[in-house]
Amino acid sequence: MAKTVAKSTSPKSIKSKKPTKPIKAKKDLERLSIRGLAAPVTINVDKWGISHIQAKSLPDLFFAQGFNAARDRLWQIDLARKRGLGLLAADFGPGYLLQDRAARMFLYRGDMKAEWACYGSDSKAICTSFAQGINAYIDLIESDPQRLPPDFVVAGNKPSKWSAEDVVRIRTHGWVRNALSEVVRANVMAKADADTDLLRTNLEPAVKPHVAEGIKLDTIPLSVLDAYKLAIAPVTFNPERMKASVKTAGAWSKVDPRGVVFEDPSFQGSNNWAVHGSHTATGRPIMANDPHRAHAVPGLRYLVHLTAPGFDAIGAGEAILPGIMLGHNGHSAFGLTLFFGPDEEDVYVYETKPGKANSYRYKDGWEDMKIIEETVKVKGAPDQKLVMKFTRHGPVIFEDAARNVSYAIRSVWFDPGTTPYGASLISMRSRSFDDFRRAMRNWAVPAVSQVYADVKGDIGWITAGYSPVRVGWDGLLPIPGDGRYEWKGYLDADQMPWVRNPPKGFVATANEMNVPANWPTKADQIGFEWWEPSRTNRIHEILGSQNKHRVSDSQALQTDSFTVPARRLKPLLAKLSSTDKAISAALVMLHGWDCRLTAESGAAALFELWWSTHLKPAFFAKVVPNPEVRALVMAPGDVESILVSFENPTPRLGSTAARDEMLLTTLGAAYADAAKRMGTDPASWAWGTIHKGYFAHALNPLQSPEEAKNFNVGPLAKGGGDSTPMMAAYRIDNFRIYMGASVRVVVDVGDWDKSVCINSPGQSGDPRSPHYGDLAPLWAKGEYVPMSYSAEAVARVTKETIVLAPKK
């Protein structure tokens, strides 16, 4: 259950290239005069760094939310704004010019009135107040420079002010699908076949990808994706990039293979569920949510409690956005999983006019690309011009002049209402399931499965996201841009699946293909790429077996380390034996194992070493002999397809005897590997010895090793894996966890103070703060802290109060 650490493990001071004063010791009460407020606002910060903001009006509330977000996460939100708007070069030099250009390609450039209307009648006012709050904190730094986070000192830049439009015009901090997969699939099919690509990502329902007339898959290079990858990639820092000149700026246009894996939207996930009161111990519903994203410091999610007349909500969002996207409002609880199935992107291939590369064939004639030139400031260099080209479908991401071919991406991003999570400004205020469903009509990006529960006893599941209508084609491969393959609008929200109060007593999702078989809109009208079912099978198995579910049960399920792949492979091993001592010892070790990837388990360490670094590579080497193709399908590799191949050996894998030989040989190699990594005594082995949570700061390459330590959190021994409900996906080269749940929330609907949460590594993004890394040890052990809601509960846990008073 919920515990706290007595002493923060986060750094207390920072050494950097320029001197910086340590942050002032916080007083129990701090009063600040801030211009822009109509009335005083109180921010009560609890012992875990969660801010409880109380205002007398909504404008003041969202102003204070922006101010508070900047107080805790200024470096993060400033970098996110500059990355999203394409303003990095002004702060960091020519090495960031092409990333700026890539980001600007995907900005919303449409009608702002239509954009604001999608998020509610007061959305512009809310975002205006939020931006003004951020700017007020930047003003405070100018009068009190010691508040400047040390990240800015290391990077040598300063924070910039926001406008309301900045909040919604940026698209690339949220994801859509599946441009990356289209191009990779084309390359795999060109060099192998469609069945081989199923080992990369399975397709549900089963379908043979449509190759459009005029498309030659073997002519589509992977480099088509370079600009797109750069647009969605995180910002990286190193001395060479920071010193780049205008002449060498072009060298900084690629994303390394590891970065590509991190950003691949198909390898994101989440869990959520809502349990009806008829299946809980208290008779009240329980809602649980743990979205999974790439790990970083500071983390992506930010917990906050927002209170004003008529509105009282607590939960998680992103520091760059007003409001919350998951949590509760004292009446309704809600949570999301990223993703639901809609395919919201397409890669278009154009024939361009010989001698006039800016014209492309469309229907019976030629159409000119729209060319936009923007002048940008560049640190240490003269202003530069960024040239971008657009077809009627979207930005041109690659040009092959020798073949008279260009490529562009069509994305829902370019339509009004598609700023990520924008509709949460409506949904977070829902007071009934019907209200929530109406709010979801406005939810465009990312495509999600939402769960819901309220004090009236209703629970439900709703899917949301703009789902393009394709007639006669499937969206799985690049298609011609000549007018034959156009979207026919979007599916109406009423066509998307939903359910209220199902007879089984709960709703739950984990990114699986969950379009009901009897739903009028079939899955093949929505999308084909989903997550493999290991997590959802485990979650449904547990929830289906419990009639008296408790908050503690949801906590246990969110941190459940049971691995379904192990349960499916163990019966195959049970039939085998070997005279080899190492193999025999490994068989015995796994035979008695409970299939749980706990940090303390030696058998878990053996299994994951075997599965990820020996068995899967051997499998792919056998069934995908072409090493170029193998590199494309192995990361991450479709777990379900691999397991089915072992359970029912295909001709590619060979006979049952050949399968068994592979199982034994690789298991023996894994046993030797474990001994090399953890010692010769298997009793001393433990999964957490090699499987670590580690939150590394992006600025590390600009620091000495000693300085970098103060910016990082970890390493922390942790259980779980990429097929367990407690998602903890790791790099196979060093077993460092790079993706999973940072924030977890379990809501006791109606008895709100019994709700719990955790956010990792901490609430603050300032390395000097005691809340920079204090929650990470709890997170690693699967523990929680209270999600205090009532005034009395908040008062009991408050450690610091900040009063913002209007400044005349």
Image: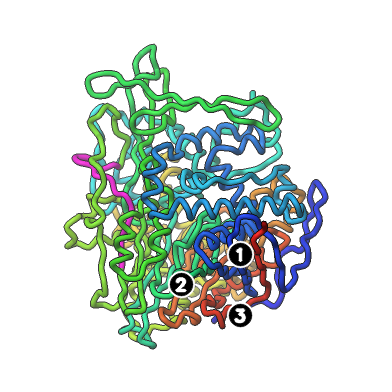
State if disc 2 and disc 3 touch (CB < 8 Å).
no
| Residue 644 appears in the picture as rendered | no
Labels 1, 3: front one: 3
Residue 470 sits inside the magenta stretch? yes
How far apart, in angstroms, are the residues tagged by discs 3 and 2?
Answer: 28 Å
373 displayed left or right of 143: left
Judged from the image, the secondary structure of the residue bearing numbered disc 2 is: helix
Please give the label number shown on residue 763: 1
SS for dot 1:
loop
Residue 676 picture quarter: bottom right
Which badge, 3 or 2, is on the more N-terminal residue? 2
* Foreground residue among 26 and 222: 26
Magenta stretch: helix, strand or loop mostly: loop
Q: Which residue is mark 3?
A: 795
Q: Please tell me the numbered disc located at residue 558.
A: 2
Q: Could you tell me how far apart the alpha carbons at marks 2 and 1 are, in whole angstroms?
A: 20 Å
The vertical placement of 598 against 700, above or below, is below
* Corner quadrant of residue 642: bottom left
| Left or right relative to 185: residue 79 | right
Circle 2 residues within 10 Å: few <14, some 14–19, many ≥20: many
Q: Position of residue 162 (x, y in %)?
A: 57, 46
Q: Which residues are magenta?
A: 461-475
Q: Are marks 1 and 3 in contact (CB under 8 Å)?
A: no
Residue 566 numbered mark, or none: none
> Which structural element holds mark 3?
helix
In this rendering, is residue 306 above or below 79? below
| Residue 245, magenta (yes or no) | no
Q: Which amino acid is tagged 2?
A: Gln
Q: CA distance from mark 1 to mark 3?
A: 19 Å
Callout 1 amino acid = Gln
